[in-house]
Structure formats: structure tokens, C-alpha cells
Image (cartoon, grey):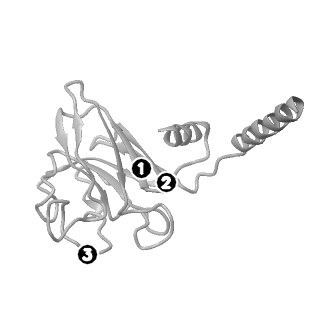
Amino acid sequence: MRPFVFAAALAVSLTGCAGMMQPATTDNTAAAELRNASGQTVGTAALTEVSGGVRIVLEMRGLPPGAKGVHIHEVGRCEPPGFTSSGGHFNPEGKQHGALNPQGSHAGDLPNITIGANGSGRLETMTTQVTLSQGPRSILGDTPRALVVHAAPDDFKTDPTGNSGARIACGVIVKAPATPTALRRRSSAVRA
């Protein structure tokens, strides 16, 4: 009986390993490289669609300290210096701005990121208001979107921008390439 149990356990283990070795698809991942008005890269974002929504991990550096508003904007264009080419907040349902607004929130409204004294910060959040799949709430596809960091914190209630001030960094959200880095990021997102 023991050899049979051992053989069955080995078969299950090998099947699991084979599944892990299959190439990962990037259908549910996206990324953005954020640049400042001078064109310097100041951040990266990894977006992964999971069963509970879209997980966003934003890492910034070289910014002034303090809380900063973060939003997904409707147009995937980041022309410096003011990044106004990215349009307004992504808002397919025509709501008002902010989670504290009774008529809100925009689909592109995200939590603030806090930048430390060393100029860096990290935001990990989950949103159910956007998708990386097809449909009206998609932030990929025919109309790419942009991820924008603002100079001031979002107050989560003032329409249309949450009083978050000037746009200081912007990155176009694109389908994540199937590179080893993207695959490592995807693996990290699955483990978290």
C-alpha cells in the first residue's frame, strides 16, 4: 500500500510542477512607467487583474515628500510639462469625484501615496472599479489610459479632482510585456 501512496503523491507533485512551468500569459497584467515634467523616470506601476478586482502596486522616487493624489486618467497620453493631455479622471459611469462624495466616485479615483523624506513611496491598492479585460471599465484596449500622480493629497470629495493640485508625474498604462521581469512581478502578485 505504501508504494502506491508514494507513487500517487509523486504524480500529484509532478503535475503541480508541470502546471507551474507552463508559460504565464500577460492577459491580466499591465504596467506604466511614470515620468516627471523633465522626462526622468520617477516611478513604475504594476497592475494585475485578480478575482477581486485590479491590484495596483505603484513605486515612486525623486518626488517631494508628503501625500500625493493618484488617479487613472481617461487618455493614455503624457505630454509634459503639465500632462493635461491625459484628460480628466477615468469616469465611464459619469459620477462625481471621491469616495467621500455621495455622487462619487470616479472609476479612476485611487488612494493617496505618501512620499517619504527620501523622495520615495509605495502604494499597494485594489480597485473593483476598473478592469484589464474588455468592456466599458477597461483601462487597456483601444483607448489606453494614464496613471497620474499629483502634487497635493486628494481630499476624496471635491469634484472634479479632489483638490489634488498639479500633475507631477504621468505614465501610459500598457499591456505588460512577456519578459522575465514581468513574469517575476506576476509571480509576486500571485503570492501576495
Can you tell which mark lies on residue 114? none
Q: 136 or 65: nearer the eye?
A: 136
- The amino acid type of the residue labelled 2 equals Val
Marks 1,2: beta carbons within 8 A? yes
Structural crowding at the residue carrying mark 3, measured as other residues with C-alpha within 10 Å and reported as few (<14), some (14–19) or many (≥20): few
Q: Please tell me which of labels 1 and 3 falls first in the chain.
A: 1
Q: Earlier in the sequence, mark 2 or mark 3?
A: 2
Q: CA distance from mark 2 to mark 3?
A: 25 Å
Q: Could you classify mark 1 by the number of other residues whose Cα lies within 10 Å: few (under 14), some (14-19), or many (20 or more)?
A: many
Horizontally, residue 178 falls left or right of residue 111, namely right
Residue indicated by mark 1: 55
Q: Position of residue 87 (x, y in %)?
A: 27, 64
Q: Position of residue 188 (x, y in %)?
A: 51, 37
- In the visual, does 41 lie left or right of 177? left
* Amino acid residing under circle 3: Gly
Residue at the spot of label 2: 50
* Residue at which label 3 appears: 94
The 10 Å Cα crowd at callout 2, few under 14, some 14 to 19, many 20 or more, is some
